[in-house]
Amino acid sequence: MFDYYCRGFGFDCVEINSSFYHLPMAKCMASLVRRSPEHFSFMVKLYQAFTHNLAEASPEAFLHFRRGIAPLLDSGKLEGLLAQFPPAFLPSEDAREWLLYLREWFAPIPLFMDFRHRDWNTQDNLTFLQQEGLGYCFVDVPPVLPLPHFLPRVTNGVGYLRLHGRNRKWYRPQTSRYDYHYRERELRSVLTTLRGISPPPSHIFIFFNNCHAGAAVRSAKRFRELAAGHATPSLYGVHH
């Protein structure tokens, strides 16, 4: 699947999601480095203990994670790390201190924050991220509380967008929250919004996660076709 992803589809970046559920293994990461094209790159999601179960975020777990991603870092193909927090992770002094703690563990690797509560979408919080050199990941999700609004902002010079679909049944049982097919007008609207980011980022990483029944692949391919006709910052890795 990975070979087809980067060679068959021609995408140039992938967001590794398995590292959220299991600490990454160096031999697996080294295999991805060997199998990927020369100019291919990676984003890696942080282990869930670092974002969801903070009591389990031991120094040993941090060291294990660092060792696991070392082949990606050594190869020069690691673009950054993604910290996806749950809705219960709310803005506070303790929360900000935790973000700085994560930065200390993973410096100098760029670190991007994906918040799932709209209380983070304030200028004060974005200014904090910018002052501390932390990246902001803006997400496209359905307008359901407490999920954040679509707020394209760049706090470390690099754009990071994740499109999860707009299925309003996000929190209902027995549904696939990622069951959503982006319409072309929606993709065009997203693209127009990205073109209006000011100041413009050096480049933008874009990942589709509306993965039910292969919708992400279709959305990503069409989005890339649309982007090819616009003067935008470089767009990377349009598939999750």
Image: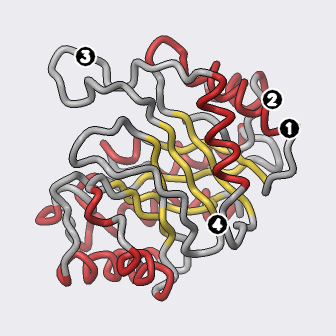
For mark 4, what is the residue?
158
Secondary-structure class at tag 3: loop
Q: Is residue 4 left or right of residue 17?
A: right
Quarter of the image where one finds residue 207: top right
Label 2 or label 4, whichever lies nearer to me, is 2
**Is 113 rendered above or below residue 36?**
below
Vertical placement of residue 9 versus 64, above or below: above
Q: Which residue is mark 2?
A: 225
> Marks 3 and 4: CB-CB under 8 Å?
no
User: Which amino acid, by three-letter code, is at mark 2?
Assistant: Glu
- Report which residue position mark 1 lands on: 228
The residue under the point 43% across, 75% down is 126
N-terminal-most mark, 4 or 1: 4
Mark closest to the chain's N terminus, 2 or 3: 3
Q: Amino acid at mark 3?
A: Thr
Which residue is denoted by mark 3 in the rendering? 175
Task: Inspect the image, locate mark 1, and give the three-letter code of the amino acid beneath it.
Answer: Ala
